[in-house]
């Protein structure tokens, strides 16, 4: 048994770590005959890198805010009043995992093109909005699950009633009671969304937005050493998100343990 | 003039009606308990008063105002839950101040009121603690302070002591009552524990299957139960089959032993006689019993015995060094006050 798990681990390492190591090593060979950080310097110094990365970070943050505003009240209400709808909600929020993004993107382009009733693709802002909507959809499965799991640890019904008897409105209940008690869950959903949005290609390319994903692809087709450096950077961002995710998970568990 | 009035409240969930024509008038500052077995509708009545359940029919008035259609947030009601329901992200002080903050009370005034409430519940120094840093009893006291801080018109408590262990339960029950008296707040207390209801309340409503089986002071409920359900639910009760000998003079025969009762009897036939364990006392002559087991209850001894016809009888004896406990198999005779018997048609 032990042997098998070690073997599995070793196999994983071969397929996961070796390419990474190889890529990292390659990214350092921009200068002939010696290792250097030239490729990184060139990537980080590229104004287009800076612009696309900043754009994607902003889009990710807007996506997260929109996702939280959409998912928290919905999941809360489903738990509080529509518990019969929970299986339906689970199914609906899983759909973005099943339907390829390209289908959603083409759907958007058909529905909201310049000759449609709502010509969102006609302006840059409108297209940005569509992009964010697409990303909210993509991150929905992760956000919804994270928030729903967080809600499960709360006695939502009683906390709501306690707030109501103290005179609180729905907005007050959501903002002062439910959301503050969901922070770890919301954060983990947020990091996952961030990791998804930051390198996403299909939506950004089809909607023709200056995002980081298309930039990576463009660099990959036009440069030699920079793509490797860029891949290492992208990996770093994703892993930082994963690390923060685990950390918030740990903190939440710690917090709950302390509560008992 | 009553302060809180419930008029013919009805509640149905789907096809099943769980509250039937429930009416109650509670005076200002009065402490009323709803007592009854599990599932009799106590919580449902309380939740209708709070506004968490709609009423299927009937009216609820507070201080003359009809609140039947008012949402819970606008009823000015304080509620304490069995599971405390403190906000985990707020300190004790934050919890107590929540209602004031929602009402827009300025910071300084709020802090003063919070300090006052924390002092009132005996936790003046624990304002900075989070709920998970407090014991169950402390949490429930904070929940009480939180409910009272915005000066509600009515305080509702749903089995607030059930999650606590026995010792704290008894001390907290006295504290709640004392606080309630000090503030003079009209209170409805739901419990299935008769000792709690009888010891705390001005009046008790015994509920049975969604109806008020009896409303009265604890003494009225205990000493003159209105019907067999109340008699059986509140306190222990011996039920014994007897035969009417002469209804006119109140003579009956119980396990072959003649008795004369003060109660009115049906003309003839079988009846069930009921009496509490404390109605019996050992005497030179009376009802013959044989002792089976003796329970030691501190100040009392509870004796389980049998009548000659085999029916079981439980009675209490004071525990004193002069009167040694009866032994198993010992034969005693018991005297009963004739007015202690409750007669039920068999
Ligand atoms: N939301 C609901 N939907 C359907 N039936 C309900 C609902 N709430 C309560 N009931 C039913 O109404 C009846 C009364 O319930 P209620 O909670 O008022 O009882 P209770 O006297 O408070 O009991 P307990 O001592 O167990 O708390 C029960 O039969 C219960 O099953
Ligand atoms: Mg109940």
Image: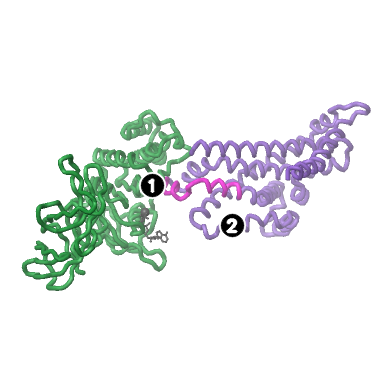
Chain colours: A purple, B green
Q: Residues within 10 Å of mark 2 (few under 14, many from 20)?
A: some
Q: Is the CB of mark 1 within 8 Å of ligand 2? A: yes
Residue A168 figure quarter: top left
Q: Percent from the top left, x then y, of residue A33?
A: 93, 27
Q: Inspect this view and state whether residue B121 appears.
A: yes
Q: Residues within 10 Å of mark 1 (few under 14, many from 20)?
A: some
Residues at marks 1 and 2 on the same chain: no
| Residue A164 among those drawn in magenta | yes
Q: Percent from the top left, x then y, of residue A177?
A: 48, 43
Of all residues shown, which one is farthest toward the right? Answer: A33
Of all residues shown, which one is farthest toward the bottom? Answer: B268
Q: Nearer the viewer, mark 1 or mark 2?
A: 1
Magenta stretch, main secondary structure, is helix
Q: Which residue is mark 2?
A: A89
Along the line of sight, the residue nearer the viewer: A257 or B293: B293
| Residue occupying image coordinates x 56% and y 40% | A183
| Residue A56 among those drawn in magenta | no
Along the line of sight, the residue nearer the viewer: A228 or B125: B125
| Residue occupying image coordinates x 32% and y 51% | B191
- Ligand 2 is in which quadrant of the figure? bottom left
Magenta region = A145-166
Q: Percent from the top left, x then y, of residue B309?
A: 20, 65
Q: Which residue is mark 1?
A: B82
Along the line of sight, the residue nearer the viewer: A21 or B2: A21
| Residue occupying image coordinates x 18% and y 41% | B320
Pinpoint the chain carrying mark 2. Answer: A
Q: Is the CB of mark 2 within 8 Å of ligand 1? A: no
Query: Label 1, label 2: how many angstroms apart (C-alpha)?
Result: 31 Å
The local secondary structure at tag 1 comes to loop
The local secondary structure at tag 2 comes to helix
């Amino acid at each position: 048994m032990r042997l098998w798990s070690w073997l599995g681990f070793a196999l994983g390492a071969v397929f996961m770590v070796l390419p990474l190591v190889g890529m990292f090593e390659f990214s350092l060979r921009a200068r002939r005959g010696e290792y250097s950080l030239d490729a990184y310097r060139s990537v980080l110094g590229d104004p287009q890198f800076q612009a696309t990365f900043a754009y994607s970070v902003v889009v990710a943050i807007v996506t997260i805010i929109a996702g939280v505003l959409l998912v928290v009240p919905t999941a809360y209400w489903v738990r509080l009043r529509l518990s019969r709808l929970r299986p339906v909600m689970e199914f609906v929020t899983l759909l973005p995992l099943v339907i390829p993004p390209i289908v959603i993107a083409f759907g958007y382009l058909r529905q909201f093109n310049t000759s449609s009733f709502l010509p969102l693709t006609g302006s840059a802002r409108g297209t940005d909005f569509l992009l964010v909507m697409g990303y909210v959809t993509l991150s929905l499965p992760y956000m919804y699950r994270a928030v729903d799991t967080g809600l499960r640890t709360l006695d939502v019904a009683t906390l709501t009633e306690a707030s109501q008897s103290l005179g609180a409105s729905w907005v007050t209940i959501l903002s002062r009671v439910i959301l503050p008690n969901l922070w770890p869950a919301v954060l983990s959903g947020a990091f996952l969304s961030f990791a998804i949005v930051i390198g996403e290609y299909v939506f950004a390319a089809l909607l023709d937005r200056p995002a980081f994903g298309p930039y990576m692809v463009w660099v990959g087709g036009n440069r030699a050493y920079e793509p490797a450096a860029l891949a290492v950077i992208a990996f770093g961002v994703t892993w930082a998100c994963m690390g923060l995710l685990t950390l918030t998970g740990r903190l939440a568990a710690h917090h709950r343990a302390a509560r008992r | 003039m009553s302060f809180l009035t419930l008029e013919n409240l009805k509640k149905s969930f789907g096809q099943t009606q769980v509250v039937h024509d429930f009416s109650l008038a509670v005076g200002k500052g009065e402490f009323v308990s709803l007592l009854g077995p599990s599932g009799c509708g106590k919580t449902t009545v309380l939740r209708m008063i709070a506004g968490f359940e709609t009423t299927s029919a009937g009216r609820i008035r507070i201080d003359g105002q009809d609140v039947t259609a008012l949402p819970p947030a606008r009823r000015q009601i304080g509620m304490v839950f069995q599971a405390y329901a403190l906000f985990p992200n707020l300190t004790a002080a934050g919890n107590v101040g929540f209602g004031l903050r929602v009402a827009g009370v300025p910071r300084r005034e709020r802090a003063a009121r919070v300090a006052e409430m924390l002092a009132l519940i005996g936790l003046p120094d624990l304002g900075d603690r989070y709920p998970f840093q407090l014991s169950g009893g402390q949490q429930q006291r904070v929940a009480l302070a939180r409910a009272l801080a915005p000066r509600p018109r009515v305080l509702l408590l749903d089995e607030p002591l059930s999650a606590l262990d026995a010792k704290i339960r008894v001390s907290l029950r006295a504290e709640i009552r004392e606080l309630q008296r000090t503030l003079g707040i009209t209170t409805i207390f739901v419990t299935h524990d008769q000792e709690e209801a009888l010891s705390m309340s001005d009046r008790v409503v015994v509920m049975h299957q969604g109806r008020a089986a009896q409303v009265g002071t604890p003494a009225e409920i205990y000493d003159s139960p209105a019907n067999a359900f109340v008699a059986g639910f509140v306190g222990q009760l011996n039920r014994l089959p007897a035969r009417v000998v002469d209804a006119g003079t109140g003579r009956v025969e119980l396990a072959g032993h003649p008795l004369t009762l003060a109660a009115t009897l049906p003309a003839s036939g079988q009846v069930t006689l009921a009496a509490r364990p404390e109605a019996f006392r050992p005497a030179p002559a009376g009802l013959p019993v044989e002792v089976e087991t003796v329970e030691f209850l501190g100040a009392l001894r509870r004796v389980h015995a049998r009548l000659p016809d085999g029916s079981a009888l439980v009675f209490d004896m004071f525990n004193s060094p002069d009167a040694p406990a009866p032994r198993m198999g010992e034969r005693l005779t018991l005297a009963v006050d004739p007015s202690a018997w409750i007669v039920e048609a068999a």
